[in-house]
Image (tube, grey):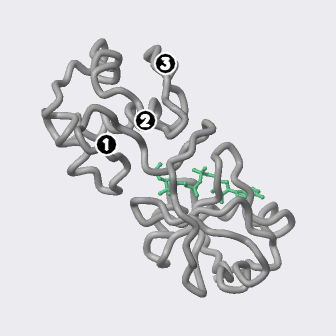
Amino acid sequence: VTNSDLTKISKYISLILRHKPEVIGIQLDANGWANVEALLAGIGRKYPIDFEVLEEIVRTDNKERYSFNEDKTKIRANQGHSIQVDVELSVTEPPEILYHGTAERFSASIEAKGLLPQYRLYVHLSPDTATAEKVGRRHGKPVIYLVNAGQMQQDGYTFLLSANGVWLTKMVPAQYLKRL
Ligand code: HQG
């Protein structure tokens, strides 16, 4: 299996574990877990991989997108879901400043309405500008917003830190945003 195959398979697994488990006829439990055997069987039509390859994908994923449970019978995405699951993240005090990378074409709407989770459960924030820039580039010409997370927390907003270092919050009103 080449690296580019692994990336392709990882994207497919992302789709299943974050958005559409039904494409392979499986379900996630309330905490976002899928049964590993069911996942392997389900993706087998497209990508007949064995458990060792799945382990390699989880281990080498560049954003640490997935976790196994302790005995590796279950797997879930660490964040990024659009379906309603609780991946058991704890409320964490954010750094004073977080960043959000997006595309220029969204900026008028963002500055009017704030950051909204759109089709996902949360708005995703990055701990540094380099990461935010990469996230923004996925959508087009990147722009970076500085998020006044410390002030938000003082005002009662809560933040979750995902297992892979992404900060999550329900929404960011425009008053806490500053374009960099
Ligand atoms: C934008 C990737 C108009 C928002 C990354 C973003 C991340 C608005 C887009 C994870 C808006 C949603 C998530 C408003 C927000 N008006 N547009 N009021 N509020 N938006 O993909 O943060 O590679 O759902 O700025 O690393 O780009 O998939 O969110 O541009 O962690 O693992 O609506 O996805 O991880 O796009 O990325 P997304 P995101 P993976």
Residue indicated by mark 2: 33
When asked about the image quadrant of residue 16, the answer is: top left
Percent across and percent down for residue 61 are 28, 50
Contact between labelled residues 1 and 3, with CB atoms less than 8 Å apart:
no
Q: Is residue 7 left or right of residue 32?
A: left
The residue depicted at 53 percent of the width and 63 percent of the height is 90
- Measured along the vertical axis of the image, is residue 20 above or below residue 87? above
Contact between labelled residues 1 and 2, with CB atoms less than 8 Å apart:
yes
Mark 2 element type = loop
Q: Residues within 10 Å of mark 1 (few under 14, many from 20)?
A: few
The residue depicted at 50 percent of the width and 66 percent of the height is 161
Quadrant hosting ligand 1:
bottom right
Amino acid, disc 3: Val
Contact between labelled residues 3 and 2, with CB atoms less than 8 Å apart:
no
Q: Is residue 29 left or right of residue 119?
A: left
Which is more N-terminal, label 1 or label 2?
A: 2
Percent across and percent down for residue 85 are 57, 40
Which is more N-terminal, label 1 or label 3?
A: 3
The residue mark sitting in front, 3 or 1, is 1
Percent across and percent down for residue 70 are 26, 44
Which is more N-terminal, label 3 or label 2?
A: 3
The residue depicted at 29 percent of the width and 16 percent of the height is 41
Residue indicated by mark 3: 23
Residue indicated by mark 1: 69
Q: Residues within 10 Å of mark 2 (few under 14, many from 20)?
A: many
Quadrant the C terminus occupies: bottom right
Whole-number angstrom distance, CA of label 2 to CA of label 3 = 16 Å
Q: Is residue 1 left or right of residue 63?
A: left
As drawn, the residue found furthest toward the right would be 112
Mark 1 element type = loop
In this view, the residue in front, 37 or 142, is 37
Whole-number angstrom distance, CA of label 3 to CA of label 1 = 23 Å
